[in-house]
Image (spheres, rainbow, N blue to C red):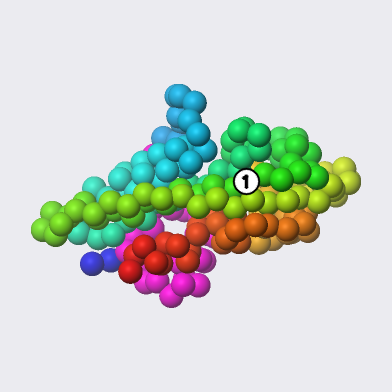
Amino acid sequence: MKIILASASPRRRELMELAGLPFETDVSDTDESIDCVMAPTEYVEELSSRKAYAVAGRHPEDIVIGADTAVVYRDIILGKPKDSEDAYRMLKMLSGKTHSVYTGVTIVRPGNSREPFHDTFHVRTDVVMYDNPDDLLRDYACSGEPLDKAGAYGIQGRGSLLIERINGDYYNVVGLPIAELCRRLR
């Protein structure tokens, strides 16, 4: 039995490697659009489940892990920015304020010859961003780093300079609450 990570995220792969988990990747091509209003916890859990099940059909005897991360400010879910101007807009919105990062994770084993298994959970981390000057936000937005990250920043990169403190799991903000995942895999 193998562990399959249903994600193209290099950060999630790095965290799986950090934990010493042997795994393979099989990227989900799941539609991530949601037609109804959902609470952030339901949103990330729904998308993580979609991603896991999209890949699980190709790996019925393996454990498949799907994950989705969302940055939320005042019930607004901030996805990945379209361009540097959109990144700047998001960063300006978060500057000097507290927001939350939610990651939903689904662990599934469809099980043709073994008993099926399903576990979906989420982790929340609150992040306090410094009240950053506009020139710093613009420079960072134009650096390219924010473009593939929910909420337009990466806490593990240059985006760390924008962050005053966090309350919760650092790795959740990176994109995968690896400690909780490992506990559930046991």
Q: Residue furthest front?
A: 167
The span picked out in magenta is 3-30
Amino acid type of the residue that numbered disc 1 sits on in the rendered structure: Ser
Please say whether residue 7 is one of the residues in the magenta stretch: yes
Q: Is residue 54 left or right of residue 124?
A: left
Note whether residue 176 is visible: yes
User: Where's the C terminus, which quadrant?
Assistant: bottom left
Look at 81% across and 51% down and name the residue there.
130
Q: Residue furthest left?
A: 113
Look at 75% across and 55% down and name the residue there.
163
Instruction: Please tell me how many numbered marks the rendered image carries.
Output: 1
User: Where's the N terminus, which quadrant?
Assistant: bottom left
Residue ID for mark 1: 100
Q: Position of residue 112 (x, y in %)?
A: 13, 54
Nearer the observer, 62 or 74:
74
Q: Position of residue 63 (x, y in %)?
A: 28, 59
Q: Is residue 140 left or right of residue 39?
A: right
Q: Give the quarter of the image for residue 172.
A: bottom right
Look at 72% across and 38% down and name the residue there.
90
Residue 51 vs 61, above or below: the answer is: above
Q: Residue furthest bottom?
A: 20
